[in-house]
Amino acid sequence: MQTSLGQSVVVENVGGADGSIGTGRAARAAPDGYTIVLGIWNTHVANAVTYRLDYDVVKDFAPIVLCAGAPLVLVAKKTIAAQDLQGYIAWLKANPGKASMATVGVGSPVHLLGILMQKETGARFTLVPYRGAGPAVQDVVAGQIDMTFANTATALPFARAGSVKALGLTSLKRLAAAPDIPTMDEAGLHGFSFSLWAALFAPRHTPTDIIAKLNAAAVNTLQDAKVRQNLEAQGFVISSGDRQTPAALTVYQQAEIEKWWPIIKAAGIKVQ
């Protein structure tokens, strides 16, 4: 974006509370276009329910652009008898409480997908929190835990090596980077989808002309061949042109909130 804007763009990684500390700083920043935040599903959907925030994830931000989204892939240890998702679900239902799923902490996408999978299938298994996706997948490879949802960049090398079984992607379409892995919907769990998306937001009251300039710079960047290649190699799907407007991001975020807030609230998930 530096080229399009004609000035430096400084990236500051602000850790803590699943991104809510950095997101809160952006919410309270001056609405002059000089401070924006790369929000994700966690920061602009889930955290509003799982944390006590001093800002509103919708009202305190001005949407700029939906950049890209990455599905997760359900991987299971290679020794399972099932050869596909339907067979595995059948085994889980016939053996309640015997299997375990690694999650990346309470309220994480993997945790919620585990809850949703139990709700949709009627299967029961133990959710085990881990410190990160890497250790979770490593334990699936080692057979210490039965399954997990992982990002494709982490999981695909193990799947290709035969170290884990990849049972389904949470995308609506198959990925170019993994054409042999069916979607969860194709594999029999209809309507089961999730994208760990990333989008740019500015503080509320940022003038529309500034939003338009930032949007144009971001869209131009996403059209760069090298940027696209790097993102797609990591399993990201860049949003289509008709979804790269501020209005489209507003609609998309609202749809995600309407889908996931009831699931999170029903599960009673609160991060202390």
Image: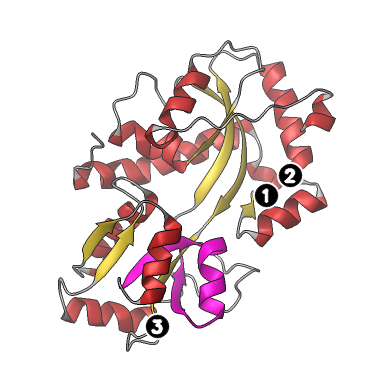
Which quadrant is home to the C terminus? Answer: top left
Question: Which residue lies at the image location 60% right of the left edge and 72% below the top edge?
Answer: 178
Q: Measure the alpha-carbon separation of dots 1 and 3.
A: 36 Å
Q: Measure the alpha-carbon separation of dots 3 and 2.
A: 37 Å
Which amino acid does the dot numbered 2 rest on?
Answer: Leu
The residue carrying pointer 2 sits among few (fewer than 14), some (14 to 19) or many (20 or more) residues within 10 Å by Cα, namely: many
Establish if 25 lies above or below 65.
above
Establish if 228 lies above or below 55.
below
Q: Is residue 76 visible?
A: no
* Viewer-closest of 258 and 21: 21
**Residue 150, quarter of picture:** bottom left
Question: Which residue lies at the image location 61% right of the left edge and 31% below the top edge?
Answer: 246
Q: Nearer the viewer, mark 1 or mark 3?
A: 3
Q: Horizontally, is 184 left or right of 172 in the view? A: left
Is residue 221 a member of the stretch shown in magenta?
no
Residue segment shown in magenta: 146-172
Mark on residue 222?
Answer: 2
Residue 266 position in % (x across, y down): 20, 45
> Which circle's residue, 1 or 3, is located before the other in the chain?
3
> Which circle's residue, 2 or 1, is located before the other in the chain?
2
**Residue 237, quarter of picture:** bottom right
Residue 268 position in % (x across, y down): 19, 42
Establish if 88 lies above or below 259.
below
Q: Nearer the viewer, mark 3 or mark 2?
A: 3
Callout 2: SS: helix
> Which circle's residue, 3 or 2, is located before the other in the chain?
3
Which amino acid does the dot numbered 3 rest on?
Answer: Lys
Residue carrying label 1: 240
Residue carrying label 3: 78
Which amino acid does the dot numbered 1 rest on?
Answer: Ser
